[in-house]
Image: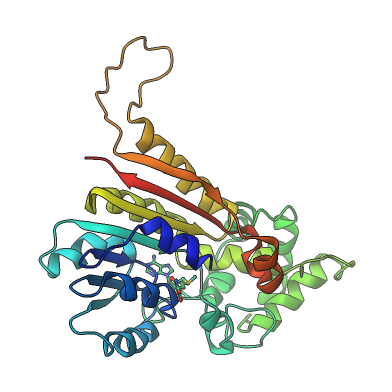
C-alpha cells in the first residue's frame, strides 16, 4: 500500500542496508531491492513462513541481496546481528495482514470466506483465534472486542459467543460471523459487515500486534544509524496512535512533566519527523477499500 510514498520516505541509495520487517508478498521489497543494488543488503522479516519462498524468488534475481528471517520484526536487532550488522539505513513496517493471507480461506482471516478460525501469522506459534473464542472468559472476550475492535456492542457479542460454545465449539469463520450478526439483530443495512470489528479485534489479540508494534518501534530506533529512515504504514487508528505518539516522543526527547521549569531527564531527541502523515488518495481507496484507514509516517534518526 502507498508503495511510492513508502519508498520515497526510505530515501534509498545503492549499497545501503534496509530492514523490511513485514515482507508479505514482497511488493515493497522488490522496489527496495531495485534501488539498493549493487551492494545493498535487505533484511527481510515476516512471521509467516510462506514469505520465505517469495523472498527466495526475489533474491534469485540479485547477487547477495540479503536474507529472510521468519520471526517478528521486534527481533530485528538479533537478525541484523546474525549478519554482523550493527546499524541499518532504513526500516519499513507495513502493518497488518497481506491480501495473500486474507484471500486464503485456510488462514481464517476473512469472514467472507469459510475456513478454520485460525488468524495466526505464524501457524506454529501463538494461540489460534478458535482457541481464544472457545476458551477465554466472557469478560476477556468483551474487552478484546471493545479495545481492539472499538466495538460498542462488545458485551452482547461475547455473551452470544459463550451461549453458543456451551453446546458447540466455534471452529469456522462463518460460524463466528453468523453468531456476531445474529447477536446484533442482523445486518440492519450497515455499510460494513457487523463481524468486521470482531475479526479485527481477534486478529490483533491472537498475534499480540500492538505489543509487537511498541517493541518493534523501540528496537528500530536503536538499530537505525544516523540519517536512517523509519517508515511505518499502519492499517487502523489503534496502530497509528502508537506510531504517532512514539515518533512525537522521540522527536521531543525530554520526558519531564510540563510543570518542571528546566529539563532534568536529560533525554535528547533521537528522531526528526519527515513531512506529515500521508493517507491514501481517493482513487487508492476506491481501488482497495481495505486501505481506507491506512496512514504512512516517516521519521529520520538523528546522530
Ligand atoms: C500488509 S502485509 C505486508 C505487505 C508487503 N509490504 C508487500 O509489499 O507485499 C503485512 C505482513 O506483515 C506480517 N507481520 C505481521 N506482524 C508481524 C510481525 N510482528 N513481525 C513480522 N511480520 C509481521 C504479516 O504476516 C504480513 O505478511
Q: Residue furthest right?
A: 188
Residue 185 visible to an observer of this rendering: yes
Residue 205: image x %, image y %? 51, 63
Residue 167 visible to an observer of this rendering: no
Q: Which of the 4 image quarters holds residue 75?
A: bottom left
Would you say 204 lies left or right of 188 here?
left
Colour approach in the figure: rainbow
Q: Quadrant of the C terminus?
A: top left
With respect to residue 216, does 299 lie above or below?
A: above
11 or 269: nearer the viewer: 11
Q: Which of the 4 image quarters holds residue 202?
A: bottom right
With respect to residue 264, does 11 lie above or below?
A: below
48 or 63: nearer the viewer: 63
With respect to residue 218, does 98 lie above or below?
A: below
Would you say 111 lies left or right of 184 here?
left
With respect to residue 156, does 63 lie above or below?
A: below
**Image region (quadrant) for ligand 1:** bottom left
Residue at image position (26%, 70%) is: 43
Residue 207: image x %, image y %? 45, 67
Count of marks placed on residues: 0
Residue 64: image x %, image y %? 18, 81
44 or 287: nearer the viewer: 287
Residue at image position (72%, 76%) is: 177
Residue at image position (33%, 76%) is: 34
Residue at image position (65%, 67%) is: 284
Q: Residue furthest top?
A: 261
Residue 51: image x %, image y %? 38, 83
144 or 162: nearer the viewer: 144
Amino acid at each position: 500500500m502507498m508503495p511510492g510514498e513508502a519508498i520515497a520516505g526510505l530515501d534509498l541509495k545503492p549499497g545501503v542496508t534496509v530492514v523490511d520487517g513485514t515482507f508479505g508478498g514482497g511488493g515493497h521489497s522488490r522496489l527496495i531491492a531495485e534501488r539498493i543494488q549493487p551492494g545493498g543488503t535487505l533484511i527481510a522479516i515476516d512471521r509467516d513462513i510462506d514469505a520465505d519462498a517469495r523472498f527466495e524468488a526475489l533474491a534469485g534475481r540479485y547477487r547477495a541481496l540479503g536474507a529472510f528471517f521468519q520471526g517478528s520484526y521486534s527481533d530485528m536487532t538479533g537478525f541484523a546481528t546474525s549478519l554482523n550488522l550493527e546499524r541499518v539505513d532504513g526500516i519499513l513496517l507495513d502493518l497488518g495482514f497481506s491480501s495473500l493471507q486474507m484471500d486464503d480461506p485456510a488462514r481464517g482471516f476473512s469472514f467472507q470466506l469459510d475456513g478454520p478460525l485460525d488468524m495466526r501469522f505464524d501457524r506454529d506459534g501463538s494461540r489460534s483465534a478458535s482457541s481464544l473464542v472457545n476458551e477465554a472468559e466472557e469478560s476477556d472476550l468483551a474487552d478484546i472486542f471493545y479495545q481492539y475492535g472499538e466495538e460498542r456492542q462488545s458485551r452482547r457479542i461475547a455473551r452470544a459467543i459463550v451461549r453458543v460454545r456451551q453446546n458447540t465449539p466455534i471452529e469456522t469463520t462463518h460460524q463466528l460471523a453468523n453468531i456476531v450478526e445474529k447477536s446484533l439483530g442482523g445486518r440492519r443495512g450497515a455499510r460494513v459487515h457487523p463481524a468486521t470489528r470482531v475479526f479485527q479485534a481477534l486478529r490483533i489479540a491472537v498475534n499480540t500486534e500492538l505489543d509487537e508494534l511498541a517493541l518493534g518501534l523501540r528496537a528500530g530506533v536503536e538499530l537505525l544509524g544516523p540519517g536512517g529512515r523509519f517508515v511505518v504504514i499502519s492499517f487502523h487508528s489503534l496502530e497509528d496512535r502508537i506510531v504517532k505518539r512514539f515518533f512525537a516522543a522521540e522527536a521531543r526527547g525530554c520526558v519531564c512533566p510540563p510543570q518542571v521549569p528546566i529539563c532534568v531527564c536529560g533525554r535528547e531527541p533521537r528522531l526528526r519527523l519527515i513531512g506529515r502523515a500521508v493517507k491514501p488518495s481517493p482513487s487508492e481507496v476506491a481501488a482497495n477499500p481495505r486501505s481506507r484507514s491506512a496512514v504512512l509516517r516517516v521519521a529520520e534518526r538523528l546522530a
